[in-house]
Amino acid sequence: MSFEDIPGSNFIKQKLIQSIEKGKVPHAQLFLGNEGALNLPLALAYTTFLHCQNKGATDSCGACPACSKSLKFIHPDTNFVFPVGNMGGDKDEERVKSDRLKTFRNFLLQQPFGSLDDWTNFYGGEDKQVNISKDESREIIKVLSLKPFESRYKVMLIWQPEYLHPNAANGLLKILEEPPPYTLFILVSNNSEKLLATLLSRTQLIKVPMLADAELANYLVKTKNIDAAKATKIVHLAEGNLNQAFKLIDGGEDDQSSEWFFAWMGACYQHRYDKLLASSEEFHQLDKLSQRNLLHFSLSLIRETLLHMLGASVINRIQGNDLERIQKFSKLLTVKKIEHIQKMLNEASFHLERNGSAKMILFDTSIQLAKVISPPKS
Ligand SMILES: [Zn+2]
């Protein structure tokens, strides 16, 4: 990963490069961003730049021996620590460890903007709990006792330190108090609230915001061969999340999801519990990511409906069929009802994240939605 592979974020890229040029590289940094922010890609590009033997003004050279290794995520001075669940029955610890690392490198190559969910899907660990085990902190200490092999610095990149086992987190804290020379810790987190405060206070914070709409739209037009109108629609649904935008485009999900959403709302409106039960069962069969995407998508259409009711122009973002359907749907609702619906959808997402039964969650939500959208006349 190089800086040029990452859209936007120019200010952060500059700041990172400057700190290296000035020789003021903090020994521990925390790249913090919400899910879908480009904090992992930026951390990876930063590491590439750090090791590069022929640095340019704005990026690594991409051609030196260090770069060619970094771009394949096999530089011997970059160590990856990442959360993982149970990957299978192999008892040989060393072999499991090396398989895990190989799988992680493949993941980074294939889905450089992937999320933790994508990662667990990638190694087939869906629905399994992930963590960074306490053995891992022993491993970190072992690696740190070695000198850098080829680079000036040894990098310990910890993805999602919020999943550190408490013992591993404490081990890391001790190391951060007295960091070994030429060792850089790069923590990449989506959730600072789950991190130990003491860990936060020992790292230099780099906040990575979500991509701006225009940055994301330009990037999609350039890389995905779609027109500006489609890009605008996707950008709005993806809310600055590049990974999500790719999925919406690749899966054609924006169209299918609209169908699904309006069919769902229609069945709620008509109190068709037979249909609602059937669609809850279908929903249950989907993988967790698709379930989450559908709820996310539904929330964005609800928000769109609200904007429409408040008189905001949605014509640029939502077009054709969807626009007509939103106009029709909005006639059934009030602002208060929409707030209610948003709350229910958020709750449904919340329970889904905690591995509740997808079928029950959707069916319960549907019953409540039906009551709100068209209250039974008494
Ligand atoms: Zn280079």
Image (spheres, helix red, strand yellow):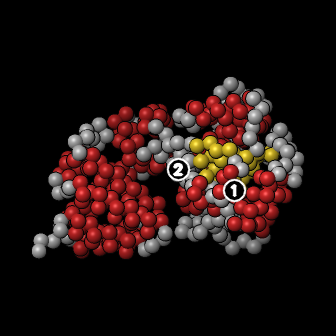
Residue 160 shows up from this direction: yes
Residue 228: x and y in percent read 37, 33
Depth-wise, is mark 2 or mark 1 nearer the camera? Answer: 1
Determine which of the numbered discs, if any, sits on residue 34 in the image: 2
User: Is 293 on the left or on the right of 159, as rendered?
Assistant: left
Of residue 236 and residue 245, the one placed in the foreground of this image is: 236
Q: Name the residue type under label 1.
A: Thr
User: Is 174 on the left or on the right of 100, as rendered?
Assistant: right
Q: Relative to residue 195, is residue 368 depicted above or below?
A: below
CA–CA distance in space, label 2 to label 1: 21 Å
Find disc 1 in the rendering and name its residue. Answer: 198
Mark sitting earlier along the chain (2/1): 2
SS category of the residue bearing label 2: loop
Ligand 1 within 8 Å of disc 1? The answer is: no
Residue 274: x and y in percent read 24, 74
Q: Are marks 2 and 1 in contact (CB under 8 Å)?
A: no
The quadrant the C terminus occupies is bottom left
Q: Residues within 10 Å of mark 2 (few under 14, many from 20)?
A: some
The quadrant the N terminus occupies is top right
Residue located 38% across and 52% down the image: 253
Residue located 22% across and 42% down the image: 311
Question: Which quarter of the figure has residue 260?
Answer: bottom left
Q: Residue furthest top?
A: 57
Residue 155: x and y in percent read 76, 46
Of residue 83 and residue 275, the one placed in the foreground of this image is: 83
Residue located 20% across and 56% down the image: 333
Residue located 52% across and 42% down the image: 209
SS category of the residue bearing label 1: helix
Residue 125: x and y in percent read 59, 66
